[in-house]
Image: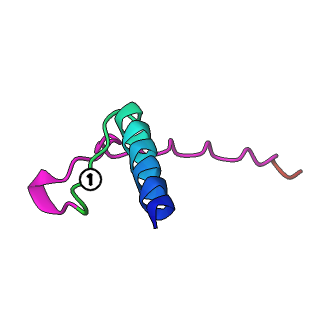
Amino acid sequence: MWKIALAFVAFAALAIFILSKGGDIDMGGEKHGAEAVHSESAQPAAPAPAPAPAVVPAAK
């Protein structure tokens, strides 16, 4: 039984160590609405330029 408790403590210590080294980790679950923060910019992509018209050789 003491081996299970020791393994749990070791696993918990490892998990806390990894999470503390991970940087900005949000353990709050899913966010919706105004409190949601997205890492990507919310700017719309610029439209692609219109393709140049094809040059058709004149028929003789």
Residue 34 position (above or below residue 23):
below
Residue 44 location, x and y as percent? 33, 46
Residue 20 horizontal side relative to residue 55, left or right: left
Residue 55 in the magenta stretch? The answer is yes
Residue 7 location, x and y as percent? 49, 56
> Range of the magenta residues?
31-57
Going 50% across and 60% down the picture, which residue do you hit?
3
Residue 29 position (above or below residue 55):
below
- Nearer to us in this view, 44 or 40: 40
- Nearer to us in this view, 36 or 48: 36
**Which amino acid lies under the numbered mark 1 shown in the image of this protein?**
Met
Total marks shown come to 1
Q: Which residue is mark 1?
A: 27
From this viewpoint, is residue 46 visible? no
Going 81% across and 47% down the picture, which residue do you hit?
58
The residue at the far left in this view is 34
Magenta region's main secondary structure?
Answer: loop
Going 44% across and 39% down the picture, which residue do you hit?
18
- Nearer to us in this view, 44 or 34: 34
Residue 55 location, x and y as percent? 73, 44
- Nearer to us in this view, 9 or 43: 9
From this viewpoint, is residue 13 visible? yes
Residue 51 in the magenta stretch? The answer is yes
Residue 33 location, x and y as percent? 13, 61
The residue at the far bottom in this view is 1
The residue at the far front in this view is 2
Going 45% across and 43% down the picture, which residue do you hit?
14
- Element class at badge 1: loop
